[in-house]
Image (cartoon, rainbow, N blue to C red):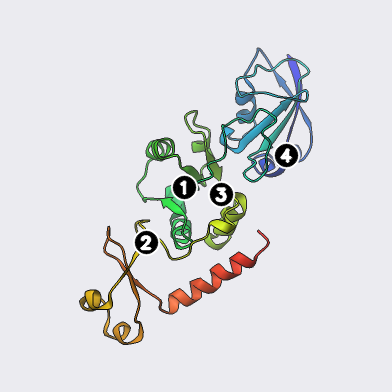
């Protein structure tokens, strides 16, 4: 039996049972497992890890663990430069695009409302989500830790909060998106960029009361949904403005 010591930092502790959180602890192993296998055996998905130090030196996921190794594991650094050490992915996806799992329907609507490019369907399988993530260079957002442990996946994040309002706040903070907000620029239903449309062209498709109260309309060329600045708009605009002021 061989022995090593390991510590996980910051939000990686969310995946650990309380006795192991925020401290260095001992782990026993046999053979020469990869550091990736060791990390995931502790419950931490590899997609949440961006830097591993073994005995003070940065290593890749394929590093083979040795007796008496001392391991430090750090989360993704989306807004800090650690280019002088060996990161575990080439760079963060700084053109922020996301694909969400079936559990995050409400979050998907909020993200589109904030203007974030968000691929979501309520019938996506895990395999489809991974394929979309790889082919379209999208970060997977999920409440299912299991999907983040798939070997093919390179960019993913486990959403900690369960309430949609808290989730969107979490994502903006986690991926440093405060300056990327472009509210009401996307269709909430299908993610397409919406465009202004003349009122006369949609007269037959909007309620009579709306015709008299609102002069400006927007249109989705893909799903044909029509938008105007009604009471819901005012409520959401207030929420977004507050979010911009938060120290996220």
**Residue to which mark 4 is pinned:** 9
At 62% from the left edge and 54% from the top edge, which residue is drawn? 173
- For residue 205, say whether it is visible: no
Q: Residue at x 28, y 74 (%)?
A: 198
- Residue 99 lies, in percent from the top left, at 44, 46
Q: Residue at x 55, y 70 (%)?
A: 239
Question: Please, is residue 52 above or below residue 155 in the view?
Answer: above
**Within 10 angstroms of label 4, few (less than 14), some, or many (20 or more) residues?**
some
C-alpha span from label 1 to label 3: 15 Å
Q: Which numbered disc, 1 or 2, marks the residue that appears first in the sequence?
A: 1
Element under label 4? loop
Residue 187's label in the rendered image is 2
Q: Are marks 2 and 3 in contact (CB under 8 Å)?
A: no
Sequence-wise first label, 4 or 3:
4
Q: Spatial distance from mark 2 to mark 3, Cα to Cα? A: 23 Å
Comes first in the chain, label 4 or label 1: 4
Q: Split into 4 quadrants, where in the image is the N terminus? A: top right
Question: SS at mark 3?
Answer: loop
Q: Are marks 4 and 3 in contact (CB under 8 Å)?
A: no
Q: Position of residue 202 (x, y in %)?
A: 24, 74
Tally of marks: 4
Real-space Cα separation, disc 4 to disc 1, in angstroms: 26 Å
Left-right relation of 242 to 222: right
Q: Which residue is mark 3?
A: 159
Circle 2: element type: loop
Task: Say few, some or many: other residues with alpha carbon within 10 Å of mark 3 (under 14 / 14 to 19 / 20 or more).
Answer: some
Distance from the alpha carbon under mark 4 to that under mark 2: 38 Å
Residue with the mark numbered 1: 97
Instruction: Please tell me which of labels 1 and 3 falls first in the chain.
Output: 1
């Amino acid at each position: 039996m061989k022995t090593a010591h390991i510590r996980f930092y910051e939000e990686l502790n969310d995946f650990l049972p309380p006795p192991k959180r925020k401290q260095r602890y001992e782990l026993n192993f046999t053979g020469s497992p990869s550091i990736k296998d060791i990390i995931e055996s502790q419950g931490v998905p590899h997609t949440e890890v961006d830097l591993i130090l073994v005995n003070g030196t940065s290593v890749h996921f394929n590093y083979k663990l040795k007796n008496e190794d001392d391991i430090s594991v750090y989360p993704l650094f989306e807004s800090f430069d650690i280019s002088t050490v060996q990161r575990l992915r080439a760079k963060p996806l700084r053109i922020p695009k996301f694909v969400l799992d079936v559990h995050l329907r409400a979050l998907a609507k909020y993200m589109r409302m904030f203007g974030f490019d968000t691929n979501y369907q309520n019938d996506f399988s895990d395999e489809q989500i991974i394929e979309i993530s790889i082919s379209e260079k999208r970060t997977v957002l999920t409440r299912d830790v299991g999907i983040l442990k798939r070997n093919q996946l390179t960019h993913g994040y486990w959403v900690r909060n369960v309430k949609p309002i808290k989730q969107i706040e979490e994502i903006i903070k986690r991926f440093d998106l405060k300056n990327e907000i472009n509210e009401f620029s996307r269709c909430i239903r299908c993610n397409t960029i919406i465009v202004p449309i003349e009122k006369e062209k949609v007269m037959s498709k909007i309620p009579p009361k709306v015709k008299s109260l609102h002069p400006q309309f927007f249109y989705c060329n893909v799903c044909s949904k029509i938008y105007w600045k009604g009471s819901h708009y005012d409520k959401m605009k207030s929420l977004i403005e507050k979010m911009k002021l938060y120290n996220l």
